[in-house]
């Protein structure tokens, strides 16, 4: 295998000191690394430790749904700071601000606690398999598992007060508000027959582990009224969040009675280099594999020409 | 600086992974090993999903062994016939291994299986190397000259059919043992995310009696093609190759390896083997601990779609 790297090699060999060569290689690698990033910079970039996502495109009207309880004078409207959140190569989690207003507010002041607001943000539903390790002959290995369908990838509940004080048990159960009422269907055709206690334990494990990853959040005092009708809340989307459409429900209560409900969709989308690489890896996996190998071979050959003299 | 890994689907600090590649590259340059058996565990311990660690590391091994293979090629230290027979077995083994990874992931036993493989192989190889290097060091101290075992002695391998002539190795043996050796190493490469040199090299020396000067080159030759095939298979069947992570590891790895090679020239062969044996055993013990110690949380989650 003869490669046309002769001029290159001569160039490298003439440079006497190895340090110079290393520095140049480092510069080259830095260049390779910063190249994708500069592409990502064309996207709206977030700065600061807890960046607030910028809205990339206008949401379409069907993203919004409104439900008014009969007889209620007040109605609620809300929106999110970004209907589309871009997951670029520099994505490291983001914060979404949810704000809304109560029309015909009867509230004397922001502090009066006249109304209660519950905000539920749910990610893409999907299948999750929970596994439990058991000690088998001194070794820990997964022995039992339970599959759940329609488990939201992300679930956040923000409210003005603890949920028990805002709405009745039945209401929360029927609307899927709070961790204990999260919709999570045991899948058909489980690997093993599971008792109801087992299922309950697996269910709790799913919620606990998702909480540990910051994907399930419940914060009973995070919705605050700013004026007589205006309120706001912020939710944290961690870096490990799954992309896809999210639903945000905003519910307005007065003395355990639902007055008005408003929902708005937001979506997390891969953008820029991140999107291309992911699409490449999943749509053309064989080509992607070949491309990865080509990069590896090129990197190896580059290193061997650059370091040829010092290697042996 | 953070970078969102497109396949691992997590945000990673790029400098940590370059440094990791550099550290392992240094050690692999120092000991003249591929480093897969160090890199894959490090990736797993740092939170990369084990299947992604295994798939991505295969790509990095291509980068780190291609320059070595090329150098051996220039010095005519590669027995291409032998390499191709090993490779034929290797690719068949890799196919099986990649399929097995998919099945084990679905039933939730992949993590356990990887750990068990590491404990077994690192334990055995590490112990053997330790004993051998200690004996060599002791003998060289007592002044007895240490000679390599002579090749050309006959053993059971010579009774098998399908004999082939391996010119550069000066061997006339059956193609079955190298094919089976390749198959076995290919299977391990796909499951453990290693090149398999740590099994290939001793097996070629002691089982096939390939002359030592040809062993390294031929092993490297087959590792390059085997890990390339494994990378493509993992990408195609399991979607577990993260190109961004692979590039980060390569950048660190190729630089680290150069420094390691320079440092390695100052140490004696048996001292290097002693140190390497210690390192191999440590990694093995770390995996053993993971299997024996009670996990902090008995439960774990995985996305059920795949």
Image (cartoon, rainbow, N blue to C red):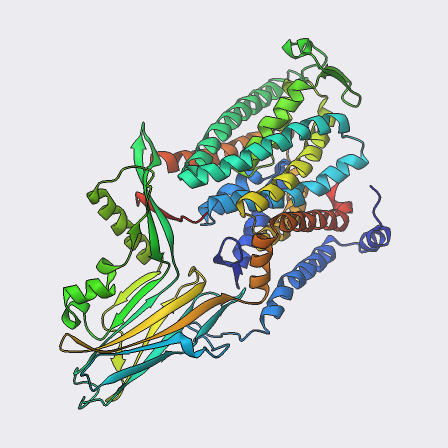
Rendering quarter of residue B153: top right
x then y, percent, for residue A199? 25, 45
Q: Residue at x 30, y 43 (%)?
A: B298
Residue A139, x across and y down, in percent: 34, 31
**Foreground residue among A231 and A12:** A231
The x and y percentages for residue B207 are: 63, 18
Viewer-closest of A293 and A155: A155
Q: Residue at x 73, y 37 (%)?
A: B69
Residue B63 falls left or right of residue A141 = right
Q: Is residue A170 left or right of residue B152?
A: left
- Farthest residue in the front direction? A70
| Residue at x 20% of width, y 44% of height | A196
Left or right for B198, reference A86: right
Quadrant in which residue A107 is drawn: bottom left
Q: Is residue B36 visible?
A: yes
Q: Is residue A6 above or below residue A88?
A: above
Q: Is residue B134 above or below residue A125?
A: above
In the image shown, does B27 or A256 lie closer to the viewer? A256
Q: Is residue B199 visible?
A: no
Front residue of A9 and A272:
A272
User: Where's the N terminus of chain A, which quadrant?
Assistant: top right
Residue under the point 64% across and 43% down:
B260
**How many numbered markers are drawn?**
0
| Quadrant in which the C terminus of chain A is drawn | top right
Residue A83 in the image: above or below residue A185? below
């Amino acid at each position: 295998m003869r490669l046309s790297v002769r001029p290159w090699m001569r160039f490298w060999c003439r440079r006497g000191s190895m340090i110079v060569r290393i520095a140049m290689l480092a510069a080259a690698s830095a260049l390779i690394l910063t190249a994708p990033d500069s592409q990502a910079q064309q996207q709206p970039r977030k700065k600061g430790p807890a960046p607030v996502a910028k809205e990339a495109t206008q949401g379409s009207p069907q993203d919004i749904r409104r439900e008014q309880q009969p007889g209620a004078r007040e109605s609620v409207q809300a929106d999110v700071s970004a209907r589309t959140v871009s997951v670029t190569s520099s994505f490291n989690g983001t914060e979404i601000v949810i704000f809304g207003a109560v029309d015909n507010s009867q509230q004397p002041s922001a502090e009066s606690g006249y109304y209660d607001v519950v905000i539920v943000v749910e990610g893409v539903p999907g299948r999750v398999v929970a596994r439990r390790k058991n000690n088998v002959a001194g070794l820990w290995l997964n022995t039992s598992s339970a599959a759940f369908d329609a488990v939201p990838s992300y679930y956040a509940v923000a409210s003005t007060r603890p949920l028990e004080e805002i709405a009745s048990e039945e209401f929360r159960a029927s609307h899927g508000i709070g961790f204990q009422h999260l919709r999570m269907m045991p899948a058909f055709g489980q690997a093993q027959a599971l008792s109801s206690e087992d299922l309950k334990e697996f269910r709790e494990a799913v919620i606990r582990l998702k909480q540990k990853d910051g994907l399930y959040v419940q914060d009973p005092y995070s919705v605050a009224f700013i004026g007589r009708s205006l309120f706001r809340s912020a939710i944290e989307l961690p870096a490990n969040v799954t992309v896809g459409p999210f639903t945000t429900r905003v519910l307005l209560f007065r003395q355990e009675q639902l007055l008005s409900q408003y929902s708005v969709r937001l979506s997390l989308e891969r953008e820029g280099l991140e999107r291309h690489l992911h699409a490449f890896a999943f749509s053309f996996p064989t080509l992607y594999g070949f491309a990865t190998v080509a990069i590896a071979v090129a990197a190896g050959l580059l290193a061997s020409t650059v370091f040829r003299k010092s290697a042996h | 600086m953070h970078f969102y890994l497109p396949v691992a689907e997590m945000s990673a600090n790029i400098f940590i992974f370059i440094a990791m590649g550099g550290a392992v590259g240094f050690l692999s340059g120092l000991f003249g090993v591929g480093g897969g058996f160090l890199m894959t565990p490090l990736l797993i311990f740092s939170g990369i999903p084990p299947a992604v660690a295994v798939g991505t590391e295969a790509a990095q091994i291509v980068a780190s062994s291609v320059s070595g293979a090329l150098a051996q090629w220039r010095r005519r230290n590669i027995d291409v016939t032998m390499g191709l027979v090993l490779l034929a077995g290797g690719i068949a083994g890799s196919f099986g291994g990649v399929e097995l990874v998919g099945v084990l992931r679905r039933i939730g036993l992949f993590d356990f299986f990887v750990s068990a493989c590491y404990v077994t192989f690192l334990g055995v190889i590490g112990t053997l190397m330790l004993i051998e290097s200690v004996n060599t060091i002791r003998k060289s101290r007592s002044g007895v000259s240490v000679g390599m075992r002579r090749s050309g002695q006959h053993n059971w391998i010579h009774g098998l059919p399908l004999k082939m002539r391996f010119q550069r190795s000066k061997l006339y043996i059956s193609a079955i043992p190298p094919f089976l050796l390749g198959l076995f190493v290919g299977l391990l490469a796909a499951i453990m995310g290693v090149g398999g040199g740590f099994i290939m090299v001793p097996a070629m020396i002691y089982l096939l009696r390939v002359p030592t000067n040809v062993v390294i080159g031929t092993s490297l030759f087959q590792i390059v093609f085997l890990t390339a095939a494994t990378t493509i298979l993992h990408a195609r069947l399991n979607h577990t190759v993260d190109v961004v992570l692979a590039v980060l590891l390569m950048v660190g790895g190729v630089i680290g390896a150069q420094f390691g090679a320079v440092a390695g020239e100052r140490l004696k062969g048996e001292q290097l083997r002693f140190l390497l044996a210690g390192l191999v055993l440590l990694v093995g013990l770390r995996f053993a601990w993971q299997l024996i110690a009670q996990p902090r949380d008995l439960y774990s989650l995985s996305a059920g779609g795949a």
